[in-house]
Image (tube, helix red, strand yellow):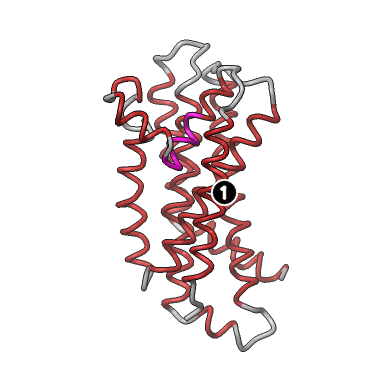
Amino acid sequence: MTKLTVVEMKLLAREPGSMFTIVLPLFILVIFGSSISPGDTVLLPMTLAIAVALVGLYLLPTTLATYRERGILRRLSTTPVRPRNMLIVQLLLQLVLALTACALLLAVAGTVLGAHLPTRVVPVVVAFALGTAAMFAIGLLIAAVAPNGRTANGVGVLLYFPMAFLAGLIQPADKMPVILAGIGEFTPLGAFRQTLQDVWAGASPSPLLLGAMAAYAVIISVAAAKFFRWE
């Protein structure tokens, strides 16, 4: 298991998509961060949600679907390293990548841009954990049904943009029609972005949005497990 983790970590570090998921949110933060006020509670939560969504909707499903397409998971079933171990390692490494991207965003925002950082740690951790679980669940479902890595990549990209729009990541939610903004708030990415924004502003996270993210994580994960195939 340790050797598998080391090998997969090296492969993930060489993957261009890994750098993309780190650089793009950081680029957005730096470009727009120079024009925000020190007490802004919108931009940083937005870029954190973008970072997690890129890993969950783009990198995770593409990697797993590519492994199945190339027969790697099938060949692993004949060795002591079971395919399930590969899935666990990939989930952990993708989580580490998302955490690394978010840690970099927080470091740059807090030191260079002087952005507002929340003082209550627990609500942030809960919001981040549930939002990440929901995003990764969607990625697993894409990997489960996509026949190959290229299809998984395309589906992830096609899902990301409408989800990002409804979540208020492309256009601010307060500039959208009320009905559309209300719908977007209860999408997985919209609930994630709104909950992070709430805790960044010092408010308590909405139990309804937390419940929505938890429901998405559980229901979609069950669906992914049902449809997932190793070959």
Farthest residue toward the left? 177
Can you tell which quarter of the image residue 66 is in? bottom left
> Which element carries disc 1, helix, strand or loop?
helix
Above or below 7: residue 154: above
Residue in front for this viewpoint, 151 or 228: 228
Identify the residue shown where x is 57% and y is 22%.
200
Q: Position of residue 113 (x, y in %)?
A: 51, 18
Front in this rendered view, residue 93 or 83 = 83
- Asked if the stretch drawn in magenta spans residue 192, the answer is yes
| Boundaries of the magenta span | 187-194
Check disc 1 and report the residue beneath it. 133
Within-10-Å neighbours for mark 1: few <14, some 14–19, many 20+: many
Q: Residue 157 at what x, y percent from top left?
A: 33, 52
Residue drawn at x 41%, y 33% as measured from the top left: 185
Q: Nearer the viewer, residue 54 or 111?
A: 54
Q: Residue furthest right?
A: 2
The image quarter in which residue 31 lies: top left
Q: Position of residue 162 (x, y in %)?
A: 30, 43
Q: Residue at x 45, y 24 (%)?
A: 43
Magenta residue check for 195: no
The amino acid type, in three-letter code, at marker 1 is Ala
Up-down relation of residue 196 to residue 4 (above or below) = above
Q: Specify the quadrant of the image occupied by residue 218.
A: bottom right
Q: Is residue 126 left or right of residue 37?
A: right
Name the chief secondary structure element in magenta.
helix
For image coordinates 40% across by 31% down, the residue present is 28
Quadrant assignment for the N terminus: bottom right
Which residue is outermost to the bottom? 78
Q: Where does the image place residue 82, in percent across and percent down from the top left?
A: 64, 79
